[in-house]
Image (cartoon, grey):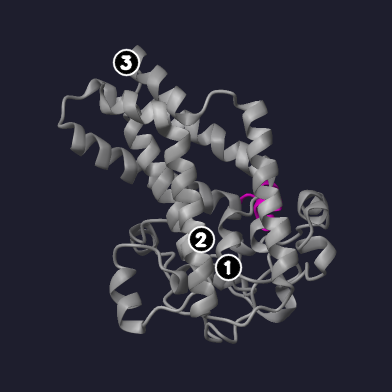
């Protein structure tokens, strides 16, 4: 049995084990060494954030009966994609696939901030008034569907091995929960770690209420793209304990903490002057993000 066949047989078990295992580790870490004091009910946020995750998973199964590994297997069988037409060691092809797919995620993340229609979807993620492990999986259903479509297109064009796709998804989910964790790392460890991995202190800046801070640190797993493309910001101006998390225009619990509010949030309000297109910021300009 090949490694791809083995992974396909146990793909669900692999992904679920890493998801729930990482969720438990970060949740316990948050209890032991929290970085910030939470501002709203953790019970309400967790029930609704995780409820949205399970709702999204159900909808994805209906809309996309074929998972990413199925697309990768089809691409491999039909010789689709760059990596299926280049001779190279399997380990090198896997590393290239994971790095390139991470770059695509970075570009996608910038685009959902830069295009007002897509920002309407993505602001569900940013509207969370607190920042913890569940924030990393909190996305609007339509954005999850968009991400899946982009992932399928990337797989067809790139032609990664099935096991490389599973490794990428496991890494992406694990790092998203890690770097959204309300956890404290020693400064010297964070300084070194963020050279290779997006850390909680690095990504937390991206969830600031301040527009120019929100439009920085777009990386999810690898931190190199922000440094390479000039979107890296080291620290928030107010400091991690004092900074405000969320979106200025949406602060009520019914809009940002309950599933009903999250699902309808993209259809509320008007974005008249989009944040990422501005060159300077002040409080009077922050009408919406």
Q: Quadrant of residue 224?
A: bottom left
Circle on res. 24: 2
**For discs 2 and 1, the disc positioned in front in the rendered view:** 2
Question: Toward the viewer: 220 or 21?
Answer: 21
Res 202 visible: yes
Alpha-carbon distance for marks 3 and 1?
A: 41 Å
Which SS class for mark 2? helix
Task: Answer whether labels 3 and 1 touch (C-beta < 8 Å).
Answer: no
Is residue 116 visible in the rendered image? The answer is: no
Asked whether disc 3 touches disc 2, contact meaning CB atoms under 8 Å apart, the reply is no
Closer to the camera in the image, 162 or 222: 162
Quarter of the image for the N terminus: give it. top left
**Residue drawn at point x = 84 percent, y = 63 percent:** 254
How far across and down, in percent of the image, does residue 18 sit? 44, 49
- x, y percent for residue 195: 29, 67
Residue positioned 53% across, 66% down in the render: 27
User: Which residue is at a point 27% across and 28% down the rendered structure image?
Assistant: 3
Q: Is residue 179 magenta?
A: no
The image position of residue 246, as x and y in percent, is 67, 70
Range of residues picked out in magenta = 115-124
- Identify the residue under disc 3: 79
The disc placed on residue 132 is 1
- On screen, residue 107 above or below 229: above
């Amino acid at each position: 049995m090949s490694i791809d066949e083995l992974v396909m047989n146990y793909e669900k078990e692999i992904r679920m084990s890493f998801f729930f295992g990482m969720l438990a580790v970060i949740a316990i870490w948050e209890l032991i060494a929290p970085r910030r004091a939470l501002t709203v009910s953790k019970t309400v946020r967790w029930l609704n954030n995780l409820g949205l995750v399970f709702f999204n998973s159900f909808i994805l199964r209906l809309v996309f009966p074929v998972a990413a590994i199925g697309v990768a297997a089809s691409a491999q069988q039909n010789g689709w994609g760059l990596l299926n037409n280049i001779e190279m060691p399997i380990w090198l092809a896997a590393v290239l696939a994971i790095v390139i797919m991470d770059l695509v995620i970075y570009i996608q993340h910038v685009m959902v901030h830069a295009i007002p229609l897509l920002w309407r979807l993505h602001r569900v993620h940013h509207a969370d008034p607190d920042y913890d492990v569940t924030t990393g999986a909190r996305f609007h259903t339509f954005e999850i569907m968009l991400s899946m479509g982009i992932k399928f297109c990337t797989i067809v064009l790139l032609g990664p091995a099935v096991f490389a796709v599973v490794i990428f998804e496991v890494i992406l989910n694990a790092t998203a929960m890690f770097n959204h964790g309300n956890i404290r790392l020693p400064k010297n460890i964070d300084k070194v770690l963020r050279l290779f991995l997006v850390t909680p202190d690095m990504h937390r800046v991206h969830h600031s209420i301040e527009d120019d801070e929100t439009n920085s640190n777009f990386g999810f797993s690898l931190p190199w793209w922000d440094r390479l493309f000039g979107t890296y910001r080291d620290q928030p101006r107010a400091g991690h304990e004092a900074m405000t998390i969320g979106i200025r225009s949406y602060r009520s619990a019914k809009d940002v903490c309950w599933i009903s509010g999250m699902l309808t949030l993209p259809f509320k309000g008007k974005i008249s002057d989009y944040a990422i297109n501005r060159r300077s910021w002040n409080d009077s300009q922050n009408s919406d993000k």
